[in-house]
Amino acid sequence: MRRDGYPSDPELIFLTDGASKGVTHLLNILIRNENDGVLCPIPQYPLYSATIQLVGGTLVPYYLSEEAGWGLDVKEMRSQVLEARKKGITVRGLVFINPGNPTGQCLSEANLRELIQFCYEEHIVLLADEVYQQNIYQDERPFISAKKVLMDMGPPYSNNVELASFHTVSKGYWGECGQRGAYFELTNMHPKTVDELYKVASIALSPNVPGQIFVGLMVNPPKPGDISYPKFAEESKAILDSLRRRAHMMTDGFNSCRNVTCNFTEGAMYSFPKIKLPAAAIAAAKRAGKAPDVFYCLKLLEATGISTVPGSGFGQKEGTFHVRTTILPSEDDIPEVMRMFKTFNEDFMAQYEGPQSRL
Amino acid sequence: MRRDGYPSDPELIFLTDGASKGVTHLLNILIRNENDGVLCPIPQYPLYSATIQLVGGTLVPYYLSEEAGWGLDVKEMRSQVLEARKKGITVRGLVFINPGNPTGQCLSEANLRELIQFCYEEHIVLLADEVYQQNIYQDERPFISAKKVLMDMGPPYSNNVELASFHTVSKGYWGECGQRGAYFELTNMHPKTVDELYKVASIALSPNVPGQIFVGLMVNPPKPGDISYPKFAEESKAILDSLRRRAHMMTDGFNSCRNVTCNFTEGAMYSFPKIKLPAAAIAAAKRAGKAPDVFYCLKLLEATGISTVPGSGFGQKEGTFHVRTTILPSEDDIPEVMRMFKTFNEDFMAQYEGPQSRL
Ligand SMILES: Cc1ncc(COP(=O)(O)O)c(C=O)c1O
Ligand SMILES: Cc1ncc(COP(=O)(O)O)c(C=O)c1O
């Protein structure tokens, strides 16, 4: 593959109507009953929790480390596997999202190596959700695919660890999520598993043709020398540059707010600030019969019209509260959006905590 | 709805990426474990057998009656339900395909009434696969929807029997199966079931936008007075008229062949002739390690290039053998196709049965 410098076998690439469908196929194959577990990050895009429940398996959570820029903590994973085993659950798969939704982190090569080592030792199939691989907003940590890291590691990893990698036209500078087109690529997958996947994928005889055309365009963009190349290069660069500026405006905006801290959006398209809610706000939420972060998001919506998703929709460490926003508002609107957010947050904190001492 | 003369509630219509996906949602909801059964016709489009297996339920077969033009035999269904119950299986759903695939039959109103009566008595949810509702090639038995029959029956049926009806842009004179667009409509479905369906459908956040546009065009075709109406009326009539002629050519062709009998393709787009295979052919198939109908279809393919699907792919009564073809070859080609088939079949029968006595 052009991206990784390693060849791909077309027989091991499956075209699907969106990455969601590919994920469903894989989880369907991986999970036999409720004693089969799949490690999933918390916080997490809830496709995974919902699908694991639907196919009747058990989600085994591992917490991302907010302090380490939402990195993967292999020690945490290992202890969760042991914990699960005590309950009679066999962990057969591990999902990671890189760049992350809702967390926006880009994983380092060292972190990915640790992860692969862990999956090798524990005989765990790796599901690499890399749908945001083109949405990168910094240069220190470029996207690096699990496949490339795995191949670079050489044997016994490169010829043993079973990996499924997902990509889609829903993201990137395309952002065409209404066009259902995606693929997954299998590496080291047992031939019997591949046969089963082929069977499951064949139940739906008819593919989504326009979606497949989009996938073709995505993996074969215009090349230097092509008539459309200058326009393509200009447009895609403009989109990505603008998203990069927006990522900075959002993160800086959040970090300037009282009781709000936010890791930088290194990739994907989300900002996931932590909101330190005062005890009085938590009590008020309880009286209103709402989770504290839901309470905060609803107040924000009512006061400003800004719609966000409470962190509890993705899972978060007990006692912490988050808000997920996208960095997608138009660049011109973001300063005003952040000003409104800041005013709301200040009023909210003042109401439940009193005036800010630092003021 | 314009089609049935009964209103529809948009809240009870779900847009899906193809009817297959809607069927999967319904079966997912209906089936809790392997003790839940769903009655399915034999022969049958294998979407149902595959999906029931995938979601972990049990298929309870009911045989269509070839002698009665592939009609539904409610006595047969009743005895299958009793049989299943003895094995501890609760029959929760019943699938029927009208017009039929692979059988091409159109069900009569009387037959549909019997079916609804039966589902009412047995508390069975009815899944009406009506994807071929626009593919009708005779005037005696026009398509009539399960919803219309149900509503016409009045209480206690019309307000009790739970029904899901499927339609898609894959069929009709559109035939756009590469555009994933379909819907299902729920009637009398328990509100909790509707909520569950809504949840399952929401896991895939992004709909297939072009497919939905196609669905819109399908249910709202040009009307008299619209600029595009004359062209639309002319084209759709030409397609359907041609298919009707093809249905006759095919059925007549098959019925003129030795040891071949074929019900008329009243609707859908398939011909499903029964082939009486000589004992010597069955023995030869056995020696070759193949099912007898597979053996016949492979010989046909080798001799003529005509590709058909053996009846065993759809299920058939023990000891009978069928071949499924579509009526979709271009009208000009069909006489030659049927001539080649006839020659092959005559040679095949002569080889395994000796020269035809009637000749
Ligand atoms: C992390 C992640 N994975 C998968 C998907 C699903 O993508 P698709 O639209 O291709 O099904 C999304 C969409 O939001 C996502 O955020
Ligand atoms: C009887 C029947 N039901 C459902 C389908 C699936 O249709 P769709 O392409 O909309 O998923 C087909 C397609 O061949 C069919 O024959």
Image (cartoon, coloured by chain):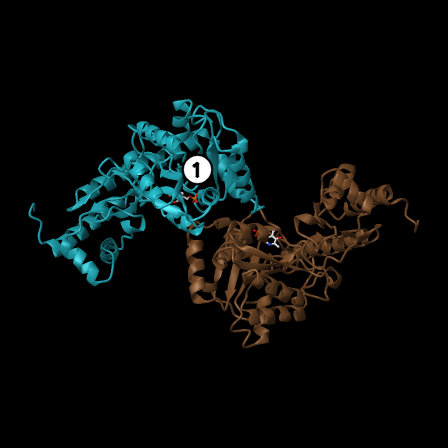
Chain colours: A brown, B cyan
Does residue B297 appear left or right of residue B45 in this picture?
A: left
Does residue B145 appear left or right of residue A57 in this picture?
A: left
The foreground one among B7 and B228 is B7
Does residue A105 appear left or right of residue A23 in this picture?
A: right
Residue at position x 8%, y 52% from top?
Answer: B355
Amino acid type shown at disc 1 = His
Count of numbered circles on the image: 1
Location of residue A312 in the rendering, given as x and y in whole percent from the top left corner: 68, 48
Residue at position x 50%, y 52% from top?
Answer: A55
**Please, what secondary structure does the residue beneath circle 1 have?**
strand
Residue at the limit of the structure toward the bottom, as seen here: A155
Screen quadrant of the N terminus of chain A: bottom right
Location of residue B140 in the rendering, given as x and y in whole percent from the top left corner: 28, 28
Location of residue B181 in the rendering, given as x and y in whole percent from the top left corner: 48, 42
Residue that badge 1 annotates = B167
Location of residue A178 in the rendering, given as x and y in whole percent from the top left corner: 57, 46
Residue at position x 83%, y 50% from top?
Answer: A257
